[in-house]
Amino acid sequence: MTNSGPLEGIRVLDLATMLAGPYGATYLGDLGADVIKLESPYGDDTRHLGPGRDGECGNFLSLNRNKRGIVLDLTKPESAPVFERLVKTADVLITNVREPAMSRLGISYEQVKAHRPDIIWAGVTAFGRDGPYAGRPGIDFLAQGYAGLVSLMGDPENKPTRVTVPMVDIMTSLLVASGVLAALHERTKSGRGQRIDVSLLDALVHAQCTGLGNYFLTGWVTPRVGNGSPYFAPSGVYECADGQMICLTCPTEKFFVNLCAAFGVGWVEEERFATAEIRLEHKEELEALIEDQCKRAPRDELMTKLIDADVMAAPMNQLPDAANDPQIHHNGMITKTEHAKLGEISVTGVPVHLERTPGSVRRGPPMLGQHTRELLSELGYSDDEAEALHRGEAVISADFDQP
């Protein structure tokens, strides 16, 4: 299949599992790179995590489009020459395997660099390559704990709660991709590869810039405010006449004035609501007034009124609503692709829109070892040699088991 996009001609080896590393590789694939997902016989952990259909899990399918799949058992000595040939064809390798397993499998930076000196090697860890937490296992949730995010989430009257969307993993995946892109650009000038290290903890600390900045400057610690804002009011989720809800916020005076106009009220003239600071002091009173106004109309009618008045408002969509949202579809963020077993499936689209060389979803997520035979052939293995590797279980492919 011919690649298209600005990274056409770049080959990426994805040796990572779960989310941050694989999704970083996916984004590079969206932009045109030839991404090869190298899995163990067990496969990526997301193949076994969460709801699925016909043996295929939604978590894996959602994260691994635009990749070809090969199963290579790196614990077997017979796999080493195959891996070496594969690395020599690659520009980038992404992994989140921890030490000492990484070196035992032969996929550390120095080991890979011996096969391909100009390789760009990206390692994803939970907390950092070295330092006091190095080597510890970790996921998105634990990074939220260390970086202070959990303490900020949830209703202030109840126990703090995690962010359930894997935002830290997603942010980390984008840092993986941006680091790879920077290293690829630098390599065009120096001819040299390099090691890249990205951690979930660093990604979230980077995202905590405003909270930490305020703390460093004044000692002020961001409070837990639920759906509100620590800086201005109103901001929250409000129930409408039909029981549905909207998200509404007024970060500047302009939008509060617009809100008052939409509701046909004179709050903007009242001293207790005169400025953002004063509105915060009278937040409970203002929230009650807004709730009363919202309950006078069904959500869609209210949304029309607020949008016409240039108010910052959105429906509180459920996931099925988001999946059918017209703007999301207009932006190409829901798209179709073909899966070898399931047929046509829906996946999320490419979030960066390049005008001349746009990215695209060109391949469905691979089944376990779907392209093993194809890739062995590209690496110069004859059919007999590939069959021998398969019999020795150094490689696995559904192709070999088909009549």
Image (cartoon, rainbow, N blue to C red):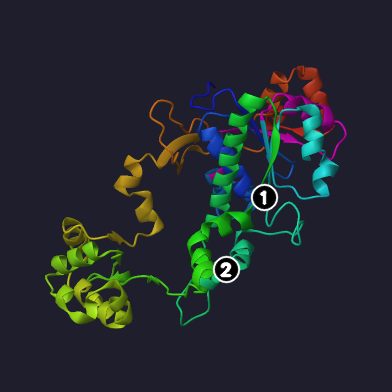
* Front one among 176 and 273: 273
Q: Quadrant location of residue 104? A: top right
From the image, tell me which residue sits under label 1.
45
Q: Is residue 259 left or right of residue 151?
A: left
Q: Position of residue 19 (x, y in %)?
A: 60, 49
How many residues crowd around disc 2 within 10 Å: few (fewer than 14), some, or many (20 or more)? some
From the image, tell me which residue sits under label 2.
148
Q: Position of residue 81 (x, y in %)?
A: 83, 27
Q: Is residue 294 above or below residue 402?
A: below
Q: Please tell me the numbered disc located at residue 364.
A: none
- Please report the bounds of the magenta region as a residue range: 63-91
Callout 1 secondary element? helix
Q: Is residue 163 above or below residue 327?
A: below
Q: Amino acid at mark 1?
A: Asp
Q: Is residue 61 visible?
A: yes
Q: Residue at x 79, y 40 (%)?
A: 108
Residue 382 inside the magenta-drawn segment: no
